Amino acid sequence: MRANLALLWLLISIPTAFAELNCTVSNSTCTYTELLHLYRLNNSHAEQANESNYDYIVCCRETNGINLNTTCGTSVINLSKSANAHVEKLTGTDYAYSICLNPNNGTITCTYQTSACSQACIGTIPSIEAGRDTSLHISDCTTYPFQTKICCSYSEPPPTSSESTQPSSGFTGRGGAAIADELSESVEPECQVNNDCPKEYYCENSTCYRLQCRESETLSFVGHSCISKQLAEELKAERTKNILFYVGIGGFVITITGIVLLNTKTNKNKHP
């Protein structure tokens, strides 16, 4: 029993992964954010996500559940038209249809490089024609990739000046009223890490702020961050499966140990 409880505690105590961007190409339905569509996996034309002519979908998500949208702010690449289009690097100026990806919190940055992407690879484009930035085809990142990768990464937001100057007067929360009425006379910081705050809060600039989860989000299992409800269900199902697996192993080990102890006791009681 103790072994089972120890295994269960170990699984629950595993920290969540760092936030990062993940994009894949699929010819089935995208359950996250559709960025653009490809006619095929290699040497292909492209179309905007609101078009429906191509089957291959570049589907992106942030692994901790931050919502993404395609409203233009951070551009990834340009298209010659909304469908059946050539692509153009952002350094080009000929194409007016921009493919964009933005988080509801934080920043996405995209670059073109020949080395491996640190987070998400959106697609690949030719680099054999030096200085050519426009009228290009696009491939996925794994099947028959071109030389240059379109790499994008997510980073969490830096502290804002308004938040850094807020007094430490209980857990204030963004836009919310303080839940502690009395100002603390101590000069000690309210928090240093998230775990110093209640689960519904996070630590920033030595102050605990209440999370503002959207309707489609929920509190993460370890607290201090919001994740999408869909991702929470997936993680819950995966965690339940892992717990059952390890508890089963624990029960097997305990059973084997009991058999060995019983045999040992039986042998000691035998008379010559």
Image (spheres, helix red, strand yellow):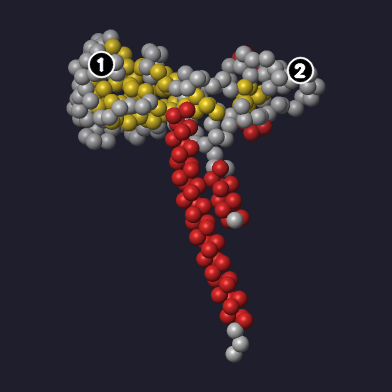
Q: From mark 1 to mark 2, how far is it between C-alphas?
A: 54 Å
The vertical placement of 265 against 182, above or below, is: below
SS category of the residue bearing label 2 = loop
Assign the N terminus to one quadrant of the image.
bottom right
Give the left or right position of residue 222, taking residue 137 as reference: right
Residue 114 can be seen in this image: yes
SS category of the residue bearing label 1 = loop
The vertical placement of 72 against 122, above or below, is: above
Residue 158 rendering spot, x and y as whole percentages:
55, 21
Give the left or right position of residue 167, taking residue 19 as reference: right
- How crowded pointer 2 is (Cα within 10 Å; few <14, some 14-19, many 20+) is rated as few
Foreground residue, 135 or 240?
A: 240
Give the left or right position of residue 15, taking residue 24 as reference: right
Residue 221 rendering spot, x and y as whole percentages:
55, 34
Asked if the residue at tag 2 contacts the one at tag 1, i.e. Cβ–Cβ closer than 8 Å, the answer is no
Residue lying at 37% horizontally and 17% vertically, measured from the top left: 70
Identify the disc placed on residue 188.
none
Q: Dot 2 corresponds to which residue?
A: 181
The amino acid pointed to by label 1 is Glu
Assign the C terminus to one quadrant of the image.
bottom right
The amino acid pointed to by label 2 is Asp
